[in-house]
Amino acid sequence: MLRNGPDAFGWVTILLHWTIAILIAGLLVLGYVMTRPDIDPVLQFDLFQWHKSFGFTALGLAAIRAVWWLAGRHPASVAGLSTPERHASFAVHILLLCLTLAVPVTGWALASASTLDIPSFYFNLVVIPHLPLAKSAVAEALWTTAHAVLAYGLAGLVLLHAGAALHHHFIRHDAVLVRMLRNRWRDG
């Protein structure tokens, strides 16, 4: 089943979820490594370009995920969730959706506002044009801070999300995690 069902996620949702999750984890690690002060400048340049390439990939997939989420049906909450838990789950998912878009956009803005004016080479295939932003040290500092704060916020929210999924799986023994790990084919 490609599309979400009444009580199960479809393969498209599952694939987007896990691909974006892996990209986010990798981007967070890469972002930390590439900003180390003791790194070789040539390696640092390459790591920044890889970070930007994977960031643009994450942005594209997050945009697809947002459209898919807005246009698609959503499986019902698992049995046993209270109203506050359902509201919290919905809020976390909306925040995750927004942050997976906002973090790469602020990264793009950072690259665009940088006084270094270094092009973003998407996997050395094409150059991604800069956003039409003024280049200045102040703007670069603003976008650097925004990108870092949102990225750390996303990391914290991802940890909360993963912790909740593990809690549901190992403590509550419900289907919250299992629904995102496998797809159930249904008759009719």
Image (cartoon, rainbow, N blue to C red):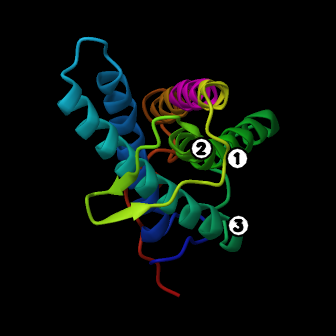
Indicate the amino acid at tag 2.
Ala
Residue 49, image quadrant: top left
Compare marks 1 and 2 and give the one earlier in the sequence. Answer: 1
Marks 1, 2: nearer the viewer: 2
**Labelled pair 1, 2 in contact (Cβ < 8 Å):** no
Nearest the eye: 8 or 66: 66
Residue 97: image location, x then y, percent: 63, 49
How many angstroms separate mark 1 from mark 3 (CA)?
A: 11 Å
Nearest the eye: 61 or 84: 61
Indicate the amino acid at tag 1.
Ile
> In the figure, is residue 6 to the left or right of 87?
left
Name which residue lies at 50% across and 28% down: 155
Compare marks 1 and 3 and give the one earlier in the sequence. Answer: 3
> In the figure, is residue 71 to the left or right of 36?
right
- What main secondary structure does the magenta stretch of the protein show? helix
Q: Which mark is residue 94?
A: 1
